[in-house]
Image (tube, rainbow, N blue to C red):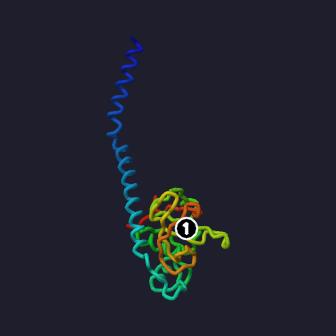
Amino acid sequence: MASSTLFSALLWLAFIGSYWLPDRPLLKSFRHNGLKEQQDDFKYRLLLVKIAKGELGLREKTGRNDGKRIGEFLITVGLKKPEPWCAAFISWVFAEAGFDQPRSGWSPDLFPVSRLARSALPGNVIGIYFPEKKRIAHVGLIEKEDGDWLISLEGNTNLTGSMEGDGVYRKRRHRKSIDKISDWVSKGRRTP
């Protein structure tokens, strides 16, 4: 009899507890904020891709890292003269979407340990390693994943995928050719 009373009491507590817990404001707030944060991240990821896609077809003026638009990308990272601009392009895209970071014209800077990711989500940044440079020497923005391939939007490249190209292109790169992926969207700081 004592064991059945104890069992009934435990069932009653479980029932009351399951009924009471979902209505706690702290839990509701946590659930809704987590979902809202994910929705905001997704919205910003789509915005980043849209901004980068808007630059497809842009070409340098004379093929020497120059032109009015390329100059705007470089100014975003504090560079004024013609310089390689793939990282400046990515930084400009993030600035246009309202993000405080990244802001660098040096492609390795876009991959700090705190931002490294494994997921190929739209809006994440890819880094291509060049053995002759012994570092990541080219970057792009993931548009989408297609099996073992990533479709990216890249500045200062060309049809062959060079790190010193002439414009903004959509590239199809195999996952094995990607050295690192970074995520500047999740927990990224956006200006209001």
Residue at x 48%, y 67% (from the top left corner): 152
State the SS at label 1. helix
Apparent side of residue 117 relative to residue 35 in the rendered image (left or right) = right
Is residue 77 among what the camera can see? yes
Q: Nearer the viewer, residue 63 or 188?
A: 63
- Rendered location of residue 183, percent (x, y): 50, 61
User: Quarter-wise, where is residue 18 in the image?
Assistant: top left
- Quadrant placement of the C terminus: bottom left
Residue at x 36%, y 32% (from the top left corner): 17
- Rendered location of residue 181, percent (x, y): 54, 62
Apparent side of residue 35 relative to residue 136 in the rendered image (left or right) = left
Residue at x 40%, y 51% (from the top left corner): 34
- Rendered location of residue 130, percent (x, y): 63, 70
Is residue 187 among what the camera can see? no
Q: Residues within 10 Å of mark 1 (few under 14, many from 20)?
A: many
Residue at which label 1 appears: 110
Amino acid type indicated by mark 1: Leu
Relative height, residue 167 to residue 17 (above, below): below
- Rendered location of residue 163, percent (x, y): 57, 75
Q: Nearer the viewer, residue 167 or 87?
A: 167
- Quadrant placement of the N terminus: top left
Relative height, residue 155 to residue 178 (above, below): below
Apparent side of residue 126 relative to residue 15 in the rendered image (left or right) = right
In the image, farthest residue toward the bottom? 62
User: Quarter-wise, where is residue 190 in the image?
Assistant: bottom left
Relative height, residue 31 to residue 49 (above, below): above
What is the tally of numbered marks visible in this picture? 1
